[in-house]
Amino acid sequence: MRRVLVTTACLAWGWAHAQPIVPTGNVPADFLAEDPAVTVINDPINDVGLPVGVRVSGFNARDMRLVYDPLADIMYVGIQTVAIAGDADGDGDPGRAGPALARDGGIDFPNFGGTESFAVSFDLDMDGTLDVVAGVPSGTDLAGFTVARYLPQALVPAVAFGMDLDPNIGEVFFNPSAEHPHLEFSVLDFSVLPSSSGRDDSAAFRVTGFLGSFSDAGVGEDFVPAIDESALVCPTPGVAERCNDFDDDCDMDIDEGFPLGEECIAGLGACARRGINVCGPDGDLACSVRAGEPQPEACDFIDNDCDGEVDEVFPVGEVCAEGVGQCAREGTFQCDGLDGVRCDAVVGQPADEVCDGLDNDCNGVTDDGFGVGDVCVVGVGACQAQGVVQCAGLNDSACVGEAGEPRAEICDGLDNDCDGATDEGIPAEPCGTGALGVCAEGARICELGSLRCAPLNEAGPEICDGLDNNCDGDTDEGFDVGVACERSADGCTTSGVIACQADGSAVCDAPEPEQAAERCDGRDNDCDGTADEGFDVGAPCSNGVGACARPGTVACDGQGGAICIGDAPGLPGEERCNGADDDCDGQTDEGLGLGAECFVGEGACRARGVFTCDGDGQVVCGAEAATPGTELCNGIDDDCDGLTDEGHGVGEACRVGLGACETTGATACASNGEIICQGEPGPPNTGAQCQIGVDDDCDGEIDEADDCGGLNLADAGVPQEILTGANLGDNCNASGRGGPPGWLGWLFVGWLATRRRREGAR
């Protein structure tokens, strides 16, 4: 079996090429490798044999590039060669054989004539058989460029051109020369090229290129990407898979992601029909059945009109009530089986009527028999008002209303204070009788609903009491009341005035002279010749504390002490962080947490300080965070961003162990700051688990003598060429891992079977 190497490439075009191809014969300039719309299939430049004296050849390809225009359905192909394309000996003249080529009888035909050929072949249905070839067949020249069916029996692509596909033939844009050194051509209507199998269920295809001549005297032919190899191309990258029995996204799976064949339901309610998921005509998932026809909605617990709601035009489930008074019960509307609804409430039983504001006997009347609601009278006298009969317990009722407010009793023949008595307790108000002195004072009394003024005193002898006792219009005449007087003793003199005494006599009211503690009263209390000394009367002072303080002046308070007289204290404000007593409580900056511990910064930058004022009335932390460092793998937030050990892949999956013991671990930080993979390797393979080509005992060596019971392929006589290819990738291995055995695997199986037959024959 031949080993097939599949090179994957995708034409990242989208709906239109960002920069349309303008052929110049220079492939790198026209098919930009960095353009995502260009597919580049590289080819080794040293894979073509050259005769002595020939250093390069125009049949040696560097790469092949493809661009597909889905709007025009044109595939553009460019082949970049080491020398001018078709210049067999690379001497700069594609139509002349140089000395080295001519020496060996080689011919360099012009215009890809004679036996010179180039061919780009397409396997459209990817069944391993080439379907279409585009290029110049051997025996023609550039004028014979064609697109044709591929002849599978042909030994080389140069003679594999079958029936021409005229509608698909594009053009070769230039005859290769020093000015236009490379091959560039087009294939028309690319999407409808025929396949050999007649089917095409994927947007992807395979392609291979060929350049060479049968008359170039030892110059080798070149295959792109290599002989017996092809490249897988996707002309529609990025296109989402649709449900259409076609591989739209070129992943070799058809309609993946769509649950085809699973059960589905079309329609809602009574229209619902059960089917299976199929692909619809628009490329979306569809159900294999159609929904039923909607019907008018009926009250039957079924969604008859198929709108996702059941009995929605009926008040099913809404609250309803039956009965009156205390017999009323709530229920809900339910379907009645006749396309209507009914209330399912069960009415309660009547009881004896009591006075409770309820219809206990369920006759539609509340508290009947108790006169509830009848008009009645509340209050007495002037407070009497209209009321209403209300319940007073379950078995009685009473008149309830708001009586008028009682007023002070006045002399008017009415019960003003609503106590059942009239004009009682009216106080005797003072009044004037019209006489002089004490004879003028009278009292107004109520008699028969009217007031009169009756005298309280009769005229008598004058005494010193501040009154006109003899009712002559003069007060305390003959007693010199108010005249200044003095009293002296032991060097102290006190002053006073003549004043009346309680017994009706008059004396000097100056205090008995004596030395006493000085008081603030305008007098020389301590008899030292100075009044109110020590009280700073008249000195400036302050009312209030802190920001509320206002200026004033010291003065006597009338009680022997001193006070500050002036503006009232100001209003306290909100305490701010400024060294002042803003709220006027005798304290400064209280309640702001000054001096308490605080922190700034994250991780390794975190610094400790205490709260202080910032000069703008705000509280700030008096600390400065450290400068962030480089994040290390040490369990510390070194760069102070709130994250620990970020950027080191901590917690991500990693691999531990060798060979069959290899398992998945987790990335972690070691105590020395190194990044390690934490995990336990699995057990080694033993017995039936052992495999050829696998490190079963997990020591880093494969199939050594002591591996898995002593089996050593080399000691067993396995040829070296089999051992060398025993672990080739791409489904070409002898171990059985990753897919079916490749050609070396089958070769090993055959050799082993032959050896066993020989040993059996012995």
Image (cartoon, rainbow, N blue to C red):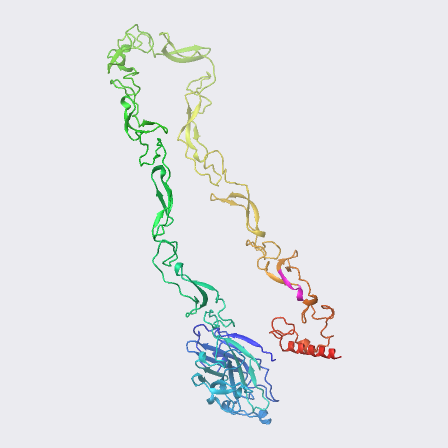
Q: Which residues are magenta?
A: 657-665
Is the N terminus in the top left, top right, bottom left or bottom right quadrant? Answer: bottom right
Out of 43 and 535, give the one closest to the viewer: 43
Is 632 placed left or right of 188 in the picture?
right
Residue 391 against residue 509 in the figure, above or below: below
Is the C terminus in the top left, top right, bottom left or bottom right quadrant? Answer: bottom right
- Measured as percent of width and height from the top left, residue 435 is found at 24, 11
- Measured as percent of width and height from the top left, residue 560 is found at 44, 20
Out of 711 and 35, give the one closest to the viewer: 711
Residue at the top extreme, as displayed? 461
Is 752 placed left or right of 53 in the picture?
right
Can residue 696 be seen from the camera position used here?
Answer: no
Q: Quadrant of residue 457?
A: top left
Residue at the front extreme, as displayed? 338
Residue 426 against residue 570 in the figure, above or below: above
- Measured as percent of width and height from the top left, residue 439 is found at 27, 10
Q: Quadrant of residue 311?
A: bottom left
Is residue 661 part of the magenta span, yes or no? yes
